[in-house]
Amino acid sequence: KKQEELATHELTHRLNKIMLATILRSVPKVSRSSLTVRVSSVSKRSMMALGEQLNKKEKVEEDRYMRAQEEAWKEKLRKLRAQEEVEREVAMHKEVVDPVKADIAAMLARSGDKVSDEGLEILAKWKLDL
């Protein structure tokens, strides 16, 4: 940023010198001293205006970048939360549903009946009221 500001400042300074030299060549010698003061004050104001515009532009670009980063971070957080939810469901399934499935399968095996794994899952969830 500082290099850009320095380069902009140098360029503005050179343009001001060229502009001042051009004006001084075309103005009679009588009014040159008052004109030099006026032009230099105008050039200082225009340099300040350019600097302010550059700062505003940089601020807008920084804000845009920060919003994009914030959105990326929010998206990562959403993905992590979704992954945690899936992991919780798998853990709940292993801790709760699988033992109930085993009990139902053992009960049915005593009577000589057999149910598919998908059927056992449905019966276990029904029994657990899930």
Image (tube, helix red, strand yellow):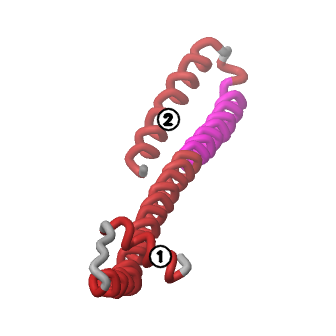
Residue stretch in magenta: 32-58
Q: Main secondary structure of the magenta part?
A: helix
Residue 26 lies in quadrant: top right
Specify the label residue 45 is tagged with: none
Q: Residue at the location (57% across, 15% down)?
A: 25
Residue denoted by label 1: 125
Image location (x, y in percent) of residue 1: 42, 50
Image location (x, y in percent) of residue 5: 46, 45
Q: Residue at the location (66% across, 25% down)?
A: 32
Q: Residue at the location (46% across, 69% down)?
A: 81
Q: Check disc 2: other Cα within 10 Å, few if <14, some if 14-19, many if 20+.
A: some
Examine the rendered structure and indicate whether residue 82 appears above or below residue 91.
Answer: above
Residue denoted by label 2: 13
Query: Pointers 2 and 1 in contact (CB under 8 A)?
Result: no
Say what amino acid the circle numbered 1 marks: Lys
Examine the rendered structure and indicate whether residue 51 appears above or below residue 31.
Answer: below
Q: Nearer the viewer, residue 2 or 69?
A: 69
Q: Nearer the viewer, residue 95 or 129?
A: 129
Q: Residue at the location (39% across, 72% down)?
A: 121
First in sequence, mark 2 or 1: give its number: 2
Select label 2 or label 1 by which is in front: 1
Examine the rendered structure and indicate whether residue 39 appears above or below residue 22.
Answer: below
Residue 33 forms part of the magenta stretch: yes
- Asked whether the viewer can see residue 91, the reply is no
Image location (x, y in percent) of residue 124: 43, 78
Image location (x, y in percent) of residue 90: 36, 74
- In the current view of this chain or complex, which residue is farthest to the front? 111
Q: Nearer the viewer, residue 114 or 77?
A: 114
Distance in Å between CA atoms under marks 2 and 1: 79 Å
Say what amino acid the circle numbered 2 marks: His
Q: Under tag 1, what secondary structure?
A: helix
Task: Please indicate whether residue 66 sits to the left or right of residue 86 in the image.
Answer: right
